[in-house]
Image (cartoon, coloured by chain):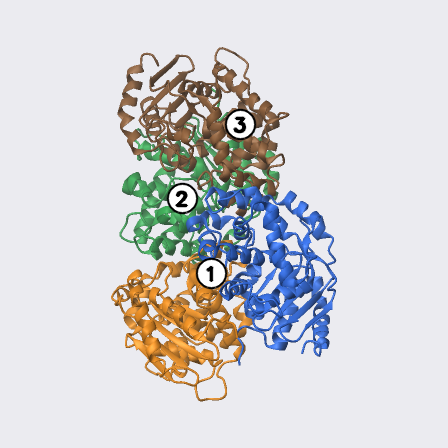
Chain colours: A orange, B blue, C brown, D green
Amino acid sequence: MIQADKKTLQRILDDNRKYTADGKVADYIPELGHANPAALGFTVATKNDGIASVGDCGTTFTLQSISKVISLLVALLDHGPKKVFAKVGMEPSGDPFNSIIKLETMDHHKPLNPMINAGAIAIASMIAGNHVEERFQRVCELLHLMTANTHISLNEQVYRSEKATGDRNRSLAYFMKSTGIIETDVEEALDLYFQLCSIQVRCSDLAKIGLFLANWGRIEGKDSPLVDPCIVQILLTIMMTSGMYNASGEFAIHVGIPAKSGVSGGILAVVPNKMGIGVIGPAIDDKGNSVAGMRILEDLSKEYGLHVFSEG
Amino acid sequence: MIQADKKTLQRILDDNRKYTADGKVADYIPELGHANPAALGFTVATKNDGIASVGDCGTTFTLQSISKVISLLVALLDHGPKKVFAKVGMEPSGDPFNSIIKLETMDHHKPLNPMINAGAIAIASMIAGNHVEERFQRVCELLHLMTANTHISLNEQVYRSEKATGDRNRSLAYFMKSTGIIETDVEEALDLYFQLCSIQVRCSDLAKIGLFLANWGRIEGKDSPLVDPCIVQILLTIMMTSGMYNASGEFAIHVGIPAKSGVSGGILAVVPNKMGIGVIGPAIDDKGNSVAGMRILEDLSKEYGLHVFSEG
Amino acid sequence: MIQADKKTLQRILDDNRKYTADGKVADYIPELGHANPAALGFTVATKNDGIASVGDCGTTFTLQSISKVISLLVALLDHGPKKVFAKVGMEPSGDPFNSIIKLETMDHHKPLNPMINAGAIAIASMIAGNHVEERFQRVCELLHLMTANTHISLNEQVYRSEKATGDRNRSLAYFMKSTGIIETDVEEALDLYFQLCSIQVRCSDLAKIGLFLANWGRIEGKDSPLVDPCIVQILLTIMMTSGMYNASGEFAIHVGIPAKSGVSGGILAVVPNKMGIGVIGPAIDDKGNSVAGMRILEDLSKEYGLHVFSEG
Amino acid sequence: MIQADKKTLQRILDDNRKYTADGKVADYIPELGHANPAALGFTVATKNDGIASVGDCGTTFTLQSISKVISLLVALLDHGPKKVFAKVGMEPSGDPFNSIIKLETMDHHKPLNPMINAGAIAIASMIAGNHVEERFQRVCELLHLMTANTHISLNEQVYRSEKATGDRNRSLAYFMKSTGIIETDVEEALDLYFQLCSIQVRCSDLAKIGLFLANWGRIEGKDSPLVDPCIVQILLTIMMTSGMYNASGEFAIHVGIPAKSGVSGGILAVVPNKMGIGVIGPAIDDKGNSVAGMRILEDLSKEYGLHVFSEG
């Protein structure tokens, strides 16, 4: 199907390239600022029908907030849902990703969900390992398994910049330390969080991560799942309600595919039982989502009937 | 299937009856306060396999917040999504249903979504008709069509009590009038809103409304849809992200069925392409959801694999 | 002193006229929008040394928020501090005058103080009288006594405009009705509030009101006070901490005189034991205070050593 | 006067000792938790009439938030009001002392005033000196001059505990770093802030600091002021509007004396041109103010007519 449809994919890319002009690249660190705002590409990895890439899929970029899905997965594997969700909520938030207000006003000071910065930092503080390096390696190893790409690794420069400019995240973290949400060393949690945000990938990697989740935690060609399907179900649902910052509701309506975006312009999307999609388009809107990237996913959803709520 | 499975349904009811003790009936108006906290029942209306009820399905109750789905549907039929969502957002909110804070702090003062009180009042202000009575009748007529039950009508006493005690809603409405979200007469919008909340139904009515949506806007036995499927898709997605007050995220994870609850203890649930479910259990939790009702839906979801994200 | 100093007063006026260009007239109702932004004038009424006016003191204007001082005074006379402050707080607020947020978040939902809109509406709801007209007359009679000017009365057109556009205030009022802060009829409280805001005065009236308070509730030439000095002390302190909207702290530092401003550009200022000052300058800043008016008060404070904290 | 009145002072102490039972000692660090909740004492240092102490004035305690006045003074001496208030506002806040919400919502993210934690940390970041030790010594030397007590110094144990548990303050600080309010090293600013909070004093020291301010920056017996009186005026006004946490408005009404409290139960009060008062009463209320201490100041104000707004 995919190979046959490469023309369609190319058309969808071409149709949406104009939207790259409607966003701009994140520039809070120089490394992100240097990205090409006109770049656009995506990879689709299907269950039974191969993988196809169109556009600028050679572009490398860092996971940024997309790493929140992976770190949640690892924390759930380490501790199970009960313990994880004792510290972080499951509710979508109408607030910006870096808002601190609800940490003060909410009962128990729990961050609303693992897809906002506060929640993801709390999740990072739970990942098992004797030291930051070991924790980071555990996450990377899972990524290597999911993608069959052992080259996925840290972008050192991005990491150092994130760490140097991460004061708002530091503020969130110390707030959570003060309320008992973070029980371990704050600087270590932040260090791991910044490292996870700085993992460098390509679209094809995201597509394969997506396919891994679409396959309920199975690596293509293997029978037994690496991950309990219940955990995948949690990830998909949280991506659906909270994955696209405070445009998650709108994206769920228009696209209807569980997805997670990052300010690097990447988007990881999962069509359960069918395919994983990886998109890159560094020109983002004021909420942090790739403008053209969202349009591509909307067109794919409409073209192939991928909306989670579809007549059938 | 359903008839054969009536034993299963009864078992699920019996298993969850104990949870009625964990909630309490809403008591801000006397009519709700008189409800029986121990009552529990549900109806399942399937696409091809009939309808089945177990438990206290003779109980009548008012729609309360469940009416928000119906009024959104009517407003979308009247004006189309573009105009409706110019006034009301699509984003889930982490706030309680009656919160006014975001009306002050959000850009453009738009209520976050049509499932919170502010959003639903704004929606009510858009429903077409020459006067409140006509607008109310238009909504009722749609309900009569959906349910084939022309007895569905206003509970006058509940309506008068809602109106007499509705000052928080009045506050929300006048705020939105002051910011231009509501463009028509505020008291008329409120009057209609209170009337819609006070429509009296049974579980079987909710189940049929659910089936109507599960059938993409088609009445059982008729071919042509009454409603554009795109509009149904919007309703289902908003119910999924925002239908269960500020427990919507948790419900989406544990149950995974688009649903809308009311403080009367009713829940309308829709399994697209398969069935509608109506639940009544007046004992609600502090967020406004029927405690035992949510458990029943969770068990149904697990028993029949109804979670929107399921292996298949 | 004052007559001798008229030159100084004139100089202070002249020095500050340029600042009228830094503000703009309120325009949420047409009557305020028609004010002359270049107008500027003030009257000083001293304890033992007569009264002097410079600038555009023939200008009439409505009290707007300055009425909050008078209505608080009447409510305190009617009920005493204990009952009044059971419903409204004494704390300065960092929020804009029409903010609703703290009504939701604060313990007991009490408006923070009587100088913000919410607090003043709650105060209006406590003023004694069989009907709105009688309550309004009671306030006017006190104003007549304070100023020896029985012409002070309602500007009907402003009142009707305030009432027609007062939806944000209506929202505040219904919120307070819903939380029990307002116990009487909401529309009557609002009606009185809008009327009090629409009382028409001149600078000389404000100066005499100020002198009345500077004299601890005594009318010039009479021995026995009309008002318990304890109540005057409360008024002066609240004006000091909260009288200039969310610029009260800055004004207290730079000027150090208890004062209350209105969006009409009027300012009532009180130098205890010395004088009352009335200022008009309709060009206001984004917080609602007369730009040139505040400068005049700062210069008067420095020229005559009127800051409450002064070496001596 | 004072010596003659020692009986009155003793009576005021005795009258209010019962209120020590209405508060409880702060216990977020063990050192504060060990304070004697029943302790109560105060010192009055007058301009021309000597000094008198009654009650438990031998008690040592740490400045805690009282240090905010001293650090503001030093920052104003170092940089002048314009530069200082470019970073920190002058407005009283209706929020708790450690609230972070307004840092996110306010224009320019400026902390509302220097008496709340966020503002005081920003102020600490401005104090001149090559390193934390030097900055701390500069503050101490000023305290030594004011009090003629060179024994005033750091309580090491309190400092270490404050630093170890100061994560909420760390959160405030990093937030301000992220918004550019803090321009220097965050950890150094915090370190100095914790040290300043941990300076150990007795009531008599506070009384002498108060007298220094009452004397407009003059040391008793010396003619030339150490501090520009304009700066003292700023301090007194900010203490008046914002010195008693979110009970500042109420305290201003009932007591009418510029004052600053700390969670150690100390209160520094200044009656301009007349006297300084130091109070200790470790049993504090839920806002952080010494319960009996406030009562003592209210009685002193009434007994001696010290309210800033008094007939005269």
Q: Secondary structure at mark 2?
A: loop
Q: What residue is shown with label 2?
A: D112
Answer whether labels 1 and 2 touch (C-beta < 8 Å). no
Disc 1 from disc 2: Cα separation? 23 Å
On screen, residue A280 versus residue B78, left or right, reads left
Any part of residue C234 in sight: no
Rendered-image quadrant of the N terminus of chain B: bottom right
A114 or C225: which is nearer to us?
A114
Q: In the rendered picture of this protein, how many numbered marks are placed on residues? A: 3
Type of amino acid at the residue the image marks with label 1: Met
Q: Residues within 10 Å of mark 3 (few under 14, many from 20)?
A: many
Q: Where in the figure is residue C287, as x and y percent of width and height?
A: 39, 37
Q: Secondary structure at mark 3?
A: helix
Same chain under badges 3 and 1? The reply is: no
Same chain under badges 1 and 2? The reply is: no
On screen, residue D251 versus residue C33, left or right, reads right
Type of amino acid at the residue the image marks with label 2: Leu
Between disc 3 and disc 2, the foreground one is: 3
Residue A289, quarter of the rendered image: bottom left
Disc 3 from disc 2: Cα separation? 29 Å
- Give the numbered dot on residue C71: 3
Q: What residue is shown with label 1?
A: A176
Answer whether labels 3 and 2 touch (C-beta < 8 Å). no
On screen, residue B14 versus residue D172, left or right, reads right
Q: Where in the figure is residue C176, as x and y percent of width and height?
A: 57, 40
Between disc 3 and disc 1, the foreground one is: 3
Type of amino acid at the residue the image marks with label 3: Ser
Disc 3 from disc 1: Cα separation? 45 Å
